[in-house]
Amino acid sequence: MRRALAIFVLLVPVAGAHDVITTKITWSKEISRLLYKRCAVCHGEGSSIPLMTYDQARPWAVDIKDEVLTRQMPPWQAVKGFGAFKDDRGMTQEEMEYISDWVTGGAPEGNPKMLPKKSDPQQWRDPDSPAGSLEVDVAGGVKLGDSRQVLAVRPKGLAKGASVQVVAARPDGSFEPLLWIFDFNPDFARTYYYVAPLSLPAGTEIEMNPPDAGKIALFTKAGGKAAKSGTGLH
C-alpha cells in the first residue's frame, strides 16, 4: 500500500505538468503579438511581472485571461462604443477571444520560429491635457454658454470602483456620448482624446449619471464663454 501511494505521489506532478492542447492558437503565432502590442509598456523586460516570453507568460496564463476578460488589462477604462477615442489601448473582442481560447486550450507555445520581432513599446498615456485647450469641469452637469469644440475628456475625483456615464444633450434634442467609465481605478486614470473634435453648440447640457459620481474634465479649444454650472440636469 505504501509503495503504491509513493508511486502515485511521484506521478501526480508529472501528469499535471502536461496540459491537453485543444486549440490551434499559440504563443509564438498569435498571443506574443498581442502582448507585445498591448502590454509591453507595463510588462516588458525589467518590470516586476515581465510577460514578453513564453516562459514568463505561461505561469500567469489564467491570470492574464481573467484580467483581459474583465478589461483590467491593458488599462483602458472607457467602455468601447460609447464615444470614439484615438489610440484605444484596450483589446478588441476578437483579441480577447484569442487570449481566452489560448488559455482554455492549454496555452501552447507553438513554433518559436513564428515569433515576431520585438519593437519598442508605445507609451499608453497621452498628455493630461491638449496643448492650448481650456478645461471645463463637469460636476452633476453644466450648460455651455457658447459653442465649443471638445478635444478630450478626463475623469476627475471619481472614487475607486465608481461608474459614470457622461452625455451631451444638444438644444435640437440630439445626444453625443462623451464617456462611460465602469469600475474606475485611479491608478490608471488618463485623458481620452476624441478621434475628431466634437462640435457642441451653445446651450448644450453636459449630463452625468449618476450626478454625484465626481467630476469630469472636458478640454475644449480656446475661446467662447464660460460654461454655466448646474445640478440635477436630466
Image (cartoon, grey):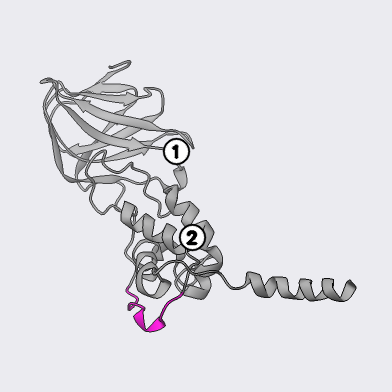
Three-letter residue code for mark 2: Thr
Quarter containing the N terminus = bottom right
Left or right of 180, for residue 1: right
Residue 95 to residue 27: above or below: above
**Residue in the image at 11% along x and 27% along y:** 201
Which image quarter holds the C terminus? top left
Can residue 141 be seen?
yes
Label 1 sits on a secondary structure element that is: loop
Q: Is residue 61 magenta?
A: no
Check disc 1 and report the residue beneath it. Answer: 183
Give coordinates of residue 103: x percent, y percent.
48, 62
Measure the alpha-carbon separation of dots 2 and 1: 26 Å
Which is nearer the eye, 82 or 108? 108
Q: Position of residue 156 (x, y in %)?
A: 38, 36
Location of mark 2 (residue): 104
Mark 1 residue type: Asp
Stretch in magenta: 109-119
